[in-house]
Image: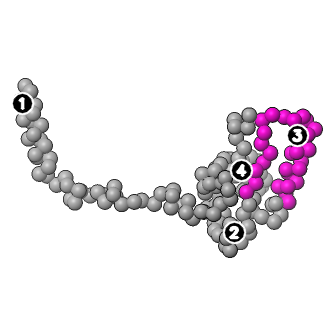
Amino acid sequence: MKYTFWLLFIVFGLIQSSENCGKNSMRNSDALTKPTPSKTMEKKRFDRLPENIETETAVEKAVKNDRGETVSFEVTTVEKILNELKADYKNDKLVDGNGKEVRFYERLCRGVSRGLEEDAQDQKAKEDELSELKKRYTVIILYCDPRKAL
C-alpha cells in the first residue's frame, strides 16, 4: 500500500512537471512578480502632510441632505478626502482643486469634563476658531474617537 502511494505520487508529479506548468508558460505569472500600485505610491503623493497626520488618519466628512444642509458626518481617511478635493502641493503648501490652502483642525476631544461652564466656553472658543479657519482655508476636521478620549 505504501509503495503504491509513492509510485502514484511520483507518476503524477512527473506528469505535472512535464505539462506546461512552468513560470514562463503560465498566464498571469508576471502579475505575481511585478509590483502593483499600492498605498505606498499614493502616500508619496501627499508626502508633506503636517506632523502627526498620515494618509490613513481618520477625519470627518459631512453628510448633506437634498437641500445641501449638513445633517451628519461619516468617518473617512485623509487620503480619500484629499483625492475628493483634488488636492496637490503648490509652493510647498497643500491646496485643493480651487487653489485654496488646506488646513487640518482638531476638535475639542476629551473624556473628562472640567465642568459645564468651562466645557461650554471651551466648545464655543473652538467653534469660533473653526469658523475663522473656514473663511480662509479648506478645513479638514480630524475625527475624535470617543473611545480613545477617556
Checking the image for residue 4, the label placed there is: 1
Amino acid found under the numbered disc labelled 2: Lys
Instruction: Give the farthest residue toward the right.
Output: 117
Give coordinates of residue 145: x percent, y percent: 70, 41
Amino acid found under the numbered disc labelled 3: Asp
Instruction: State how far apart marks 2 and 4 are (Cα).
Output: 19 Å
Secondary structure found at label 3:
helix
Q: Does the rendering let one see residue 17?
A: yes
The answer to the question of whether label 2 and label 4 lie on touching residues, with beta carbons closer than 8 A, is no
Determine the residue positioned at 56% across, 59% down: 43
The answer to the question of whether label 4 and label 1 lie on touching residues, with beta carbons closer than 8 A, is no
- Give, as a single range, the part of the protein colored magenta: 104-132
Instruction: State how far apart marks 3 and 4 are (Cα).
Output: 19 Å
The answer to the question of whether label 3 and label 4 lie on touching residues, with beta carbons closer than 8 A, is no
Secondary structure found at label 1:
helix
Precedes in sequence: disc 1 or disc 3: 1
| The magenta stretch spans residue 55 | no
Amino acid found under the numbered disc labelled 4: Leu
Give neighbour class at mark 4: few <14, some 14-19, many 20+ (Cα, 10 Å). Answer: many
Q: Quadrant of the C terminus?
A: top right
Determine the residue positioned at 29% across, 57% down: 29
| The magenta stretch spans residue 111 | yes
Checking the image for residue 93, the label placed there is: 2
